[in-house]
Image (cartoon, rainbow, N blue to C red):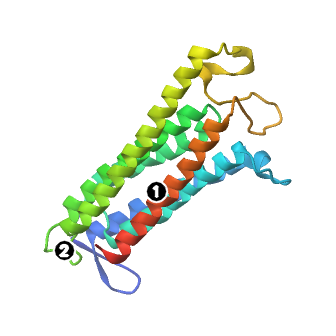
Amino acid sequence: MGNEESGNFTGEKKPCQQTKSEIYVSAIQILFGIIIAISFIDYHKTLVPPFNYNFETLLIFVTYATVLMSLIGFSIAVKNRFHKKIWRFGIDVFLLYLYFQLVYSLQFSFDYFLWIFPMIFGSYVVWQVLEYYEWKSTDNEKPYTHKEFKWVFGGTFFFTIVFLLVALSYNGIVEEKNGYFLHDLDMGLINGTAIVEERTDGVLHYLNVGDIEWKILGFLVALVFGFRIFFYYVQKYKT
């Protein structure tokens, strides 16, 4: 373990840091797969034919889109700049926990689902800062320039703030609902938010879904894909 380089099957030498990073990445990718596979079992009754375009289906879609695009983005990022230290791996593990929370927040309430996003994107910000300090040195083969970092950090921070404002706004709307309506707790209309109905057939179904929930969810979809489009162009042109 004290060697600075390790061999591979082609006889080429790899830095020890890169070898460790590949182990980290493999572990994270396996855990990603486990989360997705388990959740398919839990949500398959909602997704199987006949296909219904409803609130629950769109929720599942944006959840899987977030997780899968994060996996792809993570794989590309660590291929370009592998983990030199363990700190980013620690953030990776924490992000996996947040993805797990995101997937199963669907079984609780819409407001809880919304609050997971600023936590995920805030973790991206920390991850990117650590990546910059690992790779900013000009001694690196592919140094992380300050100009590129400013765009990556600034864009991710902006999206984090927007996700936070979305969650706060919906929380305010829920509080306003509480001021006008008396909700029946037995029907699951808790705190005015859209919440999952308890069912025995295994199908995900939300109660108390109105126009505001649809609009916020549509905006959330735009944010999730907008972030990936932004990041793609930053990486493509390296600003």
What residue do we see at 41% from left, 82% from top? 9
Q: Residue 6 carries which label?
A: none
Residue topped by disc 1: 28
Q: Where residue 199 appears, x then y in whole percent?
A: 79, 30
What residue do we see at 44% from left, 44% from top? 163
**Mark 1 element type:** helix
State which tag comes first along the sequence, 2 or 1.
1
Of the pair 38 and 197, the residue shown nearer to us: 197
- Evaluate if marks 2 and 1 touch, with contact meaning CB atoms under 8 Å apart: no
Q: How crowded is mark 1: few (under 14 residues within 10 Å), some or many (20 or more)?
A: many
What residue do we see at 49% from left, 65% from top? 72
Of the pair 98 and 90, the residue shown nearer to us: 98
Residue 80, picture quadrant = bottom left
Q: Where residue 85 appears, x then y in whole percent?
A: 25, 58
Residue 233, picture quadrant = bottom left
Q: The N terminus appears in which quarter of the rendering?
A: bottom left
Query: Which residue of the protein is positioned furthest toward the right in this rendering?
Result: 50
Instruction: Report the amino acid beneath label 1.
Output: Ile
* Residue 84 visible, this angle: no
Residue topped by disc 2: 140
2 or 1: mark nearer the eye: 2
Q: Where residue 180 appears, x then y in whole percent?
A: 61, 16
